Amino acid sequence: MTLHRELEQIGRRARTASNALRSLSRAVKDRALLMIASDLRVSGELLRAANALDLEAGRAKGLSGAMLDRLELTDKRIDAMARGLEEVAALRDPVGDITDQYVHPNGLRIARIRQPLGVVGIIYESRPNVTADAAALCLKAGNATILRGGSEAIHSNMAIAELFSKGATAAGAPEHAVQIVTTTDRAAVGEMLKLDKYIDVIVPRGGKSLIARIYEESRIPVVAHLDGICHTYLHEDADPVMARSIVLNAKLQRPGVCNAMETLLVHESAAPLLLPDIARALREGGCELRGCPRTRQIIECIPATEEDWTTEYLDKILSIRVVGSFEEAVCHINEYGSHHSDAIITDSYSMAERFLDEVDSATVYVNASTRFTDGFEFGLGAEIGISTSKLHCRGPMALEGLTTLKYVIHGSGQVRE
């Protein structure tokens, strides 16, 4: 079978499954998620064995420590996947929600009701937990899912997807509700992007080159999940203890993820007090520092280039800039950021409110780490990604983001004049 025929067959199966999923009861969907969560927990040895193959191949290819960290499935992460499914099962089902209803002067009763998108194609890299999170959310929202993970996680993704597919079917969901593209041939992405007859939306998660390719080639609407160039701005009145704690968490707690801080901005009046201690702690954590000329007058670090301000390192590297004002900090974030997650550390209520109003990002924080931008942390159960798009949905994309609206009209014989 040719690659084109193989992908077309997957698409056709997904469309058939989506027609059945649209009217699937919440009880069946929740039962499926709970069964799969249980299967994940008892299949830890199987999942770790599959993951070990990917880790071995990744080391042979010279993947960075941060990338290997994104790829690794530990017992803790397997349990987190299972807990994510249980959280999703416990959430209210958005399908069928009436978002608005009114009676027209001519007597027509008009309502807007949430409905599944249909078939969701997800193209992603590295992190195997995306397989479980995305499939769980799509199933709960009544969507069929086609998963195409990166070659670096092929064994892990296939093992998770197989457990998911078997569990969903055993619980009463239609066959092929969850499918995974098993070939590592890069041409499969191009073929998948042509399936506009079967796939309703593409959700990409990965690096700039992957996202650029999908935007260029896709015949299917794309929900943008661009890179995470996240900032933390230390205002002139930032509490030193709080600033240090948040900066270290935002950069070092897990540097290889999209909500980790990549640029630190510090007000010029606070920089001499805050930067030396923060820089020392970052270096102790193994972080490489790159700074603007004013930063390098205060601490020792590598000179930052223009490219640094637009780079998502996904590693223990941080760019630092000293700014002369609040306005300069906001301008830097809006110009160089990816509109993902940005934070201000301040004791000033007025500055905090201005930051929330003026920074044009999907998520904005006051006195908290950007690492909280996550569907699970936001109480959404899980996420299919962090949308930086302004159309359809923005921020952590979970159940509601995987639905659309349908107008339903009841009449009593009305005809248009």
Image (cartoon, rainbow, N blue to C red):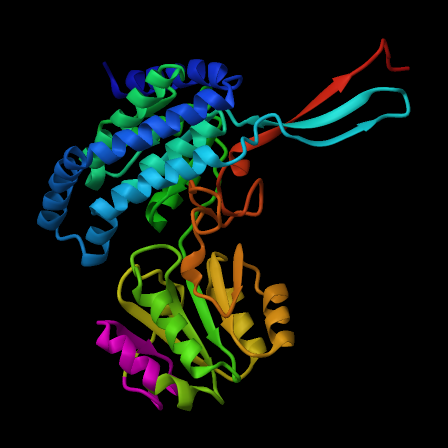
Q: State left or right for residue 286 relative to residue 253.
A: left
Residue at the (33%, 55%) spot, across then down:
257
Residue 371, horizontal then vertical, whole percent: 40, 59
The residue most toward the top is: 413
What segment carries the magenta color? 277-300
Regarding residue 185, the answer to whether it shows in the image is no
Quarter of the image that includes the N terminus: top left
Return the residue nearer the eye: 50 or 264.
50
Q: Up-down: is 251 above or below 281?
A: above
Q: Quadrant location of residue 359?
A: bottom right
Is residue 408 found inside the magenta-colored segment of the image? no
Vertical placement of residue 215 versus 69, above or below: above
| Image mark count | 0
Q: Residue at x 27, y 86 (%)?
A: 300
Q: Nearer the viewer, residue 170 or 413?
A: 170
Indicate yes or no whether the magenta region holds residue 285.
yes
Front position in the image: 116 or 199:
116
Name the side, left or right, on which 307 lies relative to 75. Answer: right
- Percent x, y of residue 330: 55, 71
The reply, left or right, for residue 201 in relation to residue 412 is left
Instruction: Kindly identify the residue that appears in the image at 35 percent across and 67 percent down.
Output: 249
Q: Position of residue 318 (x, y in %)?
A: 32, 71
Q: Quadrant of the C terminus?
A: top right
Given residues 410 and 81, the one toward you in this image is 81
Coordinates of residue 27 in the picture (x, y in percent) = 48, 22
The answer to whether residue 51 of the structure is visible from this angle is yes
The answer to whether 20 is drawn above or below residue 386 in the figure is: above
